[in-house]
Amino acid sequence: MIRTIGCLFCLLHIAFGCHSGWTSFNTSCYHVSGEPTSWMDSMKMCEMRGAYLVHVDSASEDEFVTSLMKTHGVSDVWLGGSDWSSEGSWVWEPEGNIFQYSKFTPGQPNNHNGENCLMKEAHHHYYWNDKDCDLRRAYICEDPNNPGNPVVG
């Protein structure tokens, strides 16, 4: 009987929570990787997990991402935005949705030496900055298909 109850709790966690190593916020699950990689390799690593580099769509989500960075001890992380398709037009990759929310460091983005990828930086009070896409940094993946929020269709 106890074993059956334990198994039931395990199944409920799987059905309504994030996978191990992922953290839930609103309707998405998030995974922090401290392994430094380029922006493009970070995108690929997230895609391999069925996710994408995090799309920060609100101030509350931005604060949540900051808390993940602090919890995991990472100072800079790649976010899923870029303007490499059209300079100055920041979109969330790979869909190409235009930013509805942003929190750039004052004076940024500045495209210094061709910076086209989006980073969140602790030393700039967790504001955003455009950076060289080849820099190797930590990253955060977002999976919008939280198992607790089934996809219809």
Image (cartoon, helix red, strand yellow):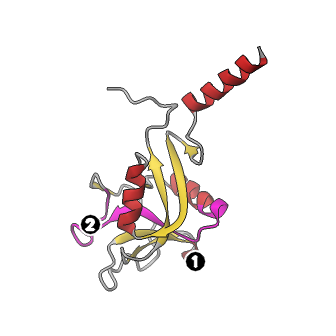
Closer to us: 35 or 145: 35
**Nearer the camera: disc 2 or disc 1:** 1
Please give the label number shown on residue 123. Answer: 1
At numbered mark 2, what does the secondary structure look like: helix, strand or loop?
loop
Q: Residue 51, image x and y in percent?
A: 41, 48
Please give the label number shown on residue 15. Answer: none
Q: Residue 106, image x and y in percent?
A: 45, 77
Residue underneath mark 2: 89
Q: Residue at x 66, y 21 (%)?
A: 8
Q: Quadrant of the C terminus?
A: top left
Q: Quadrant of residue 98?
A: bottom left
Q: Residue 53, image x and y in percent?
A: 42, 56
Closer to us: 40 or 101: 40
Closer to us: 76 or 109: 76
The residue type indicated by label 2 comes to: Ser
Q: Residue at x 37, y 78 (%)?
A: 132
Q: Residue at x 32, y 80 (%)?
A: 111
Between disc 2 and disc 1, whose residue precedes? 2
Q: Quadrant of residue 110?
A: bottom left
User: Around disc 2, counting alpha carbons within 10 Å, would you say few (fewer than 14), some (14 to 19), or many (20 or more)?
Assistant: some
Closer to us: 23 or 91: 23
In the rendered image of this protein, does residue 98 appear above or below residue 148? Answer: below
In the rendered image of this protein, does residue 77 appear above or below residue 45? Answer: below
The residue type indicated by label 1 comes to: His
Q: Find out whether the residues at labels 2 and 1 contact each other: C-beta distance under 8 Å.
A: no
Q: Is residue 139 magenta?
A: no
Q: Is residue 11 left or right of residue 82?
A: right
Determine the residue located farthest toward the bottom in the rendered image.
Answer: 113
Q: Is residue 54 left or right of residue 17?
A: left
Specify start and end residues of the magenta stretch as a single range.
69-93
Q: Is residue 86 magenta?
A: yes
